[in-house]
Image (cartoon, rainbow, N blue to C red):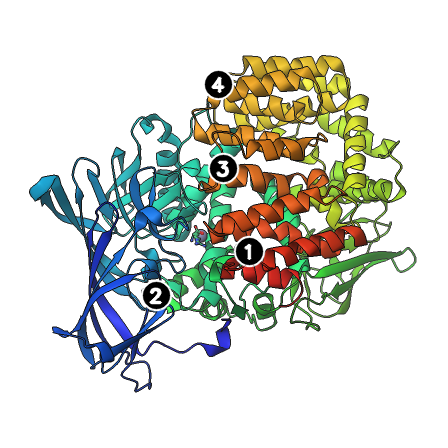
Amino acid sequence: QVKRLSDYTPPAFMIDTVALDFDLRDGETKVASTLQGRRNPQTTDITDVLELDGQGLRLLSISLNGAAVPEGGYRIEGDKLFLSAVPENFTLEIVTTIEPEKNTALEGLYMSDGMYCTQCEAEGFRRITYFPDRPDVMAVYTTRLEADADRFPVLLSNGNLMQSGMLDEGRHFAVWHDPFPKPSYLFAAVAGDLACVRDSFRTMSGREVELRVYVEHGNEHLTGHTMDSLKRSMKWDEERFGLEYDLDLFMIVAVSHFNMGAMENKGLNIFNSKFVLADPQTATDADYERLEGIVAHEYFHNWTGNRVTCRDWFQLSLKEGLTVFRDQEFTSDTHSRGVKRVADARLLRAVQFPEDAGPTAHPVRPESYLEINNFYTVTIYEKGAEVIRMIHELLGADAFRRGMDLYFERHDGQAVRCEDFVAAMEDASGIDLGQFRLWYSQSGTPELEVDLAHDPDAKTATLKVRQILPPTPGQPAKEPMLIPLSMALLDGEGQALPLQLLGENAEDIPKARVLPVSQSEQVFVFENVDDRPVPSLLRGFSAPVRLRTNRTAEQECFLYRHDDDPFARWDAGQAYLTGALTAAARKGRYDAVLDDDFLQAVGEILSGPDIEPAFAAELLTLPGESVLADAMTPADPEAIHAARNAARREIGLRHAGLFQESYDRLSIAHDPEDMSTAAMGSRALKAVALGYLVAGGDTGAVALAALQAAAATTMTESMSALQALNNVDCPERRDAMKAFHDRWQDTPLVLDKWFTLSATSSLPDTLETVKRLLEHPKFDLATPNRVRAVIGAFSSGNPVRFHAPDGAGYNFLADQVVRLDEMNPQVAARLVAPLTRWKRYDEARQRMMRQCLERIRRYAGLSPDVTELVAKGLGEE
Ligand code: ARG
Ligand code: ZN
């Protein structure tokens, strides 16, 4: 049933301590739980009924204050247990059994490659024992684990090890204690035969923290980047936010079956092995960066999420938006700020804008949901981070830091709301964030229309700004928002002009400003502007909005050459390309897609000496097909694919010489195993050059890529060669793919890359290939990484084949969703998204996509996860 924010009530009872005892045995695990609780002093609720959550548990016994509770003393209704006659203070003992071996949903306690592990966020703890499984119940946990000593020599839980020892029958035990009160979703336990890599970190106050990374035996050598990233994250959080780690031990465990990226359990992070294991032979530079960002993200949760947690799941962005903002800042400080900003904007546009424009659109702080697992979205995470970033920009770094300090001063150890964070920011800065709060409650991507007019007689430049807030499900009309619009005006040489607002006094005139757009329509008049300037807009991507301007293609190309703000420069190029490519797609004309002016600018970027290679790679990368589809109504996936290919061919042909030169120069510049930011940037540019050489159609280029694939000694080199070949129907591709497969078939994380390459090739027979991949001996529906590598990659990473006009791609996806839902609803639900975007396409596709949604819905026993998405997808809310 639907849960609503407006229905929130505080818990009637609090739990202060939890003692858990796991008896891990084949087939059945016994969990004994002892809870110390008391009436919640914060509530006037006088009920004597304690409400516990429990799912798929077999209840063996329940006793209250030492006495067995009789049959009539409690009742079980669905996934709830109601215990009556609960006194003001109580001790509750509950014994249940569970079957981790049969747990394919990978929530609660489950098995992955012979080890026991847990995933409790959001509501997995209720699959372990009866408990008030809600984040505003925070307790101190003591956990005893008992298992066979040979098969499970490592026994871990949150906090510090208190005791361990041998028992009869070859069994052993360990007792862990976590002194910090925490919500149940942060509980974790692991039992397995694992190798441990150790290191340590000295905190700013001089405490020595032991660091451990647990992996399968034989993978120890792949943990270096994880350990290094962890130490740098710990240091950065001290320096930037004054936040120090609080336990004496910090552990990361890698597991191969995991629904998401990783989980910030207190003191015992559990990671998808994809984001722990890396060396240059098996992981690409992009994998290195992603791993580093995720290690940082989970570590940063220790303060933003664990010490201060969420009152309820509607507040999820309180911890996720803030923690994503923090990991973005870490990456920006560590590598290149401009490149990171571009990468984040790309992700937002490719995934979050479409979500915000479709039937599953929801505010950063949602008001209702059916299944919370469906709300771990790019809106909660990435748009949530943008909201925090805007607060950071509005307040400035110093006031923002004071706001963070105040937030922790007020709320350490509490479960709070997004509102409490905003209030701390407001109180610490004295800046009114009243109107700004709409970013939390209004869904949809605002559109900002910005037109420049120049009056040569009055010597004024006027920016006319209009905000359009498109309707979204449940929100037909909206109030104007506060949108920080960062801008500059550039003269003919690309120099920023002084920005004197009309009527403002003329001291210290800045050359870039943040305009506080707060009304539906607003004008900003700048004085002393002799000649018509070109406006540089939304600098630094100052707000997550769609920008429309009256800038000409020529002006966009000008900014693409000259803008001094990296984001605005890149964005001007993307705006130009989006215009040119969608125009070609609409007309169905694929010759001379790009203007000479733009092609020339590309040449200047390639030959210009002063540009950071990683940023050049971004400047030279065209908007993806999904971003282009988002800018065309109705979206025509085939036309977009054709237009994008044509543009790539034009660029490749025109600059074949420069690309070859760059490729050669960048090939000798660095050691392929140098993982510095600069070396990775050079390789990114080299990959772009190779891609364009192949796109240009020269057969020599295909041979070059094949040679690179054959000679590669690192995964980055290998993957960039295979990617360059991936859409070309040639024997070189087939041979290189086969060689790659044979070489890596026993290395799951690398084999996933082979699966993804196969599933994302735009060659016409890819759907057939994908169907065959499901029969591959290494395909396994029970492994989320593999499902994502094949089915997810095809449906979200291969628009032209997924949207095949005969609907075969849609039908394929519907079949797989239904098959997977029986096993793992959470991962199944993630796959549904592309089908819910039917409104963007022509009538024939709309009909077929809707039919697929209807077909999924007809299956009996469908999970709430998939049910909710399908219902929303069909517009039934
Ligand atoms: N809190 C985790 C993170 O952002 C994600 C866990 C999501 N789990 C889930 N079942 N939805 O790092
Ligand atoms: Zn997170």
Determine if the C-beta at disc 1 is less than 8 A from ligand 2. no
How far apart are the alpha carbons under marks 1 and 3? 34 Å
> In the image, 462: left or right of 725?
right
Category of crowding for the residue at label 1, using alpha-carbon neighbours closer than 10 angstroms: few (below 14), some (14–19), many (at least 20): many
Q: Of discs 2 and 1, which sits in the foreground?
A: 2
Q: Which residue is mark 4?
A: 743
Could you tell me residue 470's position as x and y percent? 72, 65
Residue type of the residue flagged with mark 1:
Arg
Q: Which residue is mark 1?
A: 389
Residue type of the residue flagged with mark 3:
Arg
Answer above or below: position of 422 versus 706: below
Residue type of the residue flagged with mark 2:
Asp
Residue at (56, 32) in percent of width and height: 773
Residue 558 visible = no
How far apart are the alpha carbons under marks 2 and 1? 31 Å
**Secondary structure under badge 4?**
helix
Circle on res. 786: 3
Q: Which residue is mark 2?
A: 133
**Secondary structure under badge 1?**
helix
Residue type of the residue flagged with mark 4:
Arg
Residue 266 visible = yes
Tell me where residue 570 sits by quadrant: top right
First in residue order: circle 1 vs circle 3: 1
Could you tell me residue 547's position as x and y percent? 74, 54
First in residue order: circle 3 vs circle 4: 4
